[in-house]
Amino acid sequence: MAFYIRKSLKFGPVRFNLSKSGVGVSAGIKGFRLGSGPRGNYVHMGRGGLYYRATLPSGKSKKSSQSVHLKNDNDASPKYPDPTSIKIDDIVMEDIDSGDIGQIVDSSSSSLVNEINEKQMKIRLTPIFFILGLAITLFSPVAGEYKAIFFFATIILSIVLNIFDKNRKTTVIFYEIEKEAEDLLKGVYNAFEKLKNSRKIWHISSKGDIKDSKYHAGANQAVKRNTVQIGFSNPKFIKTNIPTPSIPVGSQTVYFFPDKILIFEKNKVGGLSYMNVKFQISKTHFVEEESVPKDAKIVGQTWRYVNKRGGPDKRFKDNRQIPIAEYETVHMASDSGLNEMIHISKVDQFKEVDSAIEAIKNFK
């Protein structure tokens, strides 16, 4: 999938246009367009940093700018061996989960996040109208012999109302990106493309310490994990002119926009600039009970049951060898409550993402 930036974005009867003179908004029908429209969020990315602008229905605008820097954490030395996915009933698991999504917001993202949350909470009118129209058609004497007409009118008006519902719940984020910044943004996109091509990516939802490792392949920690995939589609009810990489993390999904991350959970949204997000990247030696992905490196072998010296415990007849794979661990965290962890089968994949984001944040 090739990287692209749309020069125009259609949102109902409104079209956002990007030209050499900047961003223009037009609304109406062909041959009769008005130079105004609904609220839209515009982000300029180029020399001088990032500039945010929101236009209001009244035509007034407000501007703010921000300078952001992302810390790059050094690799930590891996433990050997580290976690395992072996099922253990007598272990206390600790959740690795973000806090209240409504609290994961910084000052640079609050305006946009508030708008998204406000629109996400709006009730869809289409189902109410459709049920009411259907009830009148079937049970009300008002419909009489015109039930078929009432029914088709209900269908047509529901379709129109559904478009209205989508428009009132949708937030527009339009990016105006200069050539130098576009080249750096392509670096982020290409890094996520490589990350997507990893054979396996897992979200780690919980972990727990193992008290007696000799009965659990010598591992000192157990984890609960689920396979996830990198996406490039925009969040529901978000309209933007640029593809958005995303990582599902349990009930939440983290979207990587050019200027910030947005975290979506059902009808709630949080947002942080990259300067307030910490990516801690390290290597993990993992006792792999399942098949080892082809792009992962096998760094050793252990046994299902080990003795004190780390060799096979001969008391167990079904004692089999288990490979130890090296994975990349990424811990996403913030002071406001972001707390998510993923494992990647191919080492150094997310490090490329981190480096690409670092280059954008240092761009001035």
Image (spheres, grey):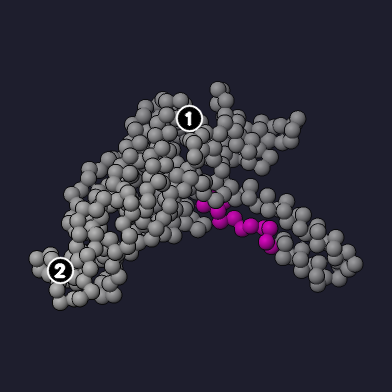
Q: Which residue is mark 2?
A: 312
Q: Residue at x 18, y 49 (%)?
A: 77
Q: Is residue 255 visible?
A: no
The mark tally for this picture is 2
**Image height check: is 144 above or below 55?**
below
Judged left or right of residue 252, residue 335 is left
Which residue is denoted by mark 1 in the rendering?
177
Q: Position of residue 39 (x, y in %)?
A: 59, 40
Instruction: Please name the amino acid that badge 2 sits on.
Output: Pro
Residue 103 is inside the magenta segment: no
Residue 127 included in the magenta stretch of the image: yes
Crowdedness near tag 2: few (<14), some (14–19) or many (≥20) residues, C-alpha within 10 Å? some
Residue span colored magenta: 116-128
What percent of the width, then of the height, locates residue 114?
A: 50, 48
Q: Earlier in the sequence, mark 1 or mark 2?
A: 1
Depth check, front residue: 212 or 363: 212
Assign a secondary structure to mark 1: strand
Observer-nearest of 203 and 24:
203
Above or below, 210 against 102 in this view is below
Location of residue 106 with respect to 53 vertically, above or below: below
Task: Quadrant for residue 103, please give it.
Answer: bottom left
Can you say which quadrant of the picture contains the C terminus? top left
Residue at the left extreme of this rendering:
309
Q: Position of residue 313 (x, y in %)?
A: 14, 72
Instruction: Report x, y in % for residue 328.
Output: 28, 50
Q: Mark 1 or 2, which is nearer the eye?
A: 2
Q: Is residue 96 left or right of residue 138?
A: left
The circle on residue 28 is none
Q: Amino acid at mark 1?
A: Ile
